[in-house]
Image (cartoon, rainbow, N blue to C red):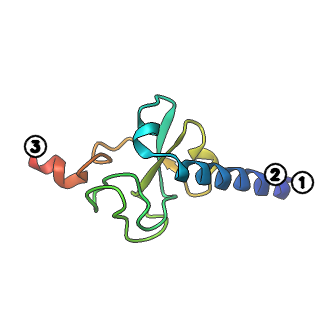
Amino acid sequence: MKTEQIIRGAMAGLLSLGVLASASGPALAAKADVEKCAGIARAGKNDCGTAKSSCAGTAKVDNDAEAWVLVPKGTCEKIAGGTVTDKPYNAHGGLAAMKQQ
């Protein structure tokens, strides 16, 4: 029974990612009910900067611990490998932009 619940939760998370992938990033960013979820983005599918990359679509590997995507609040913690991030360099330009300021 517990395994079945885990599988259902994982499937729900994957389905929500599919919905998010079809939505535009700026539209989601305008809503206050989203969070940055690191560790779940596919290579080239991250939403914006990290300590290693400058902006969207620049993640080199799947599930990079710093690469993030916007998800509905409360969803990230339900996705295997997902971690809510609030690091200041998780923004346009990444860490390189912060160093220029």
Residue at horizontal 70%, vertical 55%? 10
Disc nearer the start of the sequence (3/2): 2
Dot 3 amino acid type: Gln
Disc nearer the start of the sequence (3/1): 1
Residue identified by numbered label 1: 1
- Position of residue 3 relative to residue 23, above or below, is below
Dot 2 amino acid type: Gln
Q: Which mark is residue 101?
A: 3
Q: Residues within 10 Å of mark 1 (few under 14, many from 20)?
A: few
Q: Nearer the viewer, mark 3 or mark 1?
A: 3
Q: Are marks 1 and 2 in contact (CB under 8 Å)?
A: yes
Q: Secondary structure at mark 1?
A: loop
Provide residue 51's location: percent of width, then percent of height.
Answer: 28, 57
Using the image as rendered, state which of residue 78 and residue 92 is in the foreground: 92
Q: Secondary structure at mark 3?
A: loop
Provide residue 57's location: percent of width, then percent of height.
Answer: 37, 61
Using the image as rendered, state which of residue 16 and residue 84 is in the foreground: 16
Q: Residue furthest bottom?
A: 61
Residue identified by numbered label 2: 5
Using the image as rendered, state which of residue 69 and residue 79 is in the foreground: 69
Q: Is residue 40 left or right of residue 50?
A: right
Q: Are marks 3 and 2 in contact (CB under 8 Å)?
A: no
Q: What whole-number distance in Å separates the C-alpha atoms at marks 3 and 1? A: 53 Å
Q: Quadrant of the C terminus?
A: top left
Residue at horizontal 60%, vertical 42%? 75
